Image (cartoon, rainbow, N blue to C red):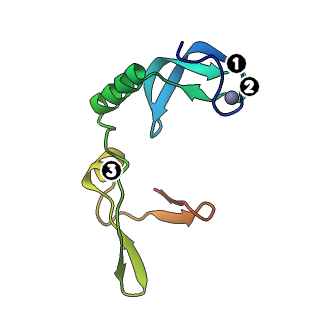
Amino acid sequence: MIRDKCDECGGKLVEKNVDFSMFGVMLGKFPAEVCSKCGEEVFTEETSAKIDEAAKEKGLYGLAASTTVGKSGDSLDIRISKKVAEFVNLQKGQTVMVHPEGKNRIVITF
Ligand SMILES: [Zn+2]
C-alpha cells in the first residue's frame, strides 16, 4: 500500500486487479489501489512501468502525439502520423466522417 486514502475525495483505497486498456485495446489486468468512493485508480510506479511495457508490446506506445494544425485553402489540415494511420488501417483516398464532440474534441469515424 502506498497510501490508504484517495487524493481526489478522501475515500478508502482498496487493492484490486483492474482491467487496463489503451486506445480501446485491452492490455490486461494490473494491480491498482481503487477508491471505493469515486473509483479513482492509482498505480504504483512499478505497475505503470509494466503497463508501458505492455503498451509497447502491442504497438500502442507513442500513438498519442501532438501535431500542428496547418492550412490548405480555406480549410485546416491536421496530419495523422504514419503510426496512427497504420494502427487504424487508414488509407489515402479513404472517405471519413469528421465531427466535433464538444468544444475540445474532434472525432474521425470510418
Ligand atoms: Zn476517491
**Residue indicated by mark 3:** 84
Q: Label 1: few (<14), some or many (≥20) within 10 Å? A: some
x then y, percent, for residue 9: 71, 31
Image quarter where ligand 1 lies: top right
- Residue 54 against residue 103 in the figure, above or below: above
Quote the CA–CA distance across marks 2 and 1.
7 Å
Q: Is residue 55 left or right of residue 12?
A: left
Check disc 1 and give the amino acid type: Lys
Q: Residue at x 28, y 63 (%)?
A: 92
Give the image quarter of residue 77.
bottom left
**Residue indicated by mark 2:** 37
- Residue 21 against residue 36 in the figure, above or below: below
Q: Label 2: few (<14), some or many (≥20) within 10 Å? A: few
Check disc 2 and give the amino acid type: Lys
Helix, strand or loop under label 1: loop
Q: Is residue 89 left or right of residue 105?
A: left
Q: Residue at x 52, y 22 (%)?
A: 19
Q: Is mark 2 within 8 Å of ligand 1?
A: yes
Q: Residue at x 42, y 87 (%)?
A: 74
Instruction: Farthest residue to the left: give it.
Output: 82
Q: Which mark is residue 12?
A: 1
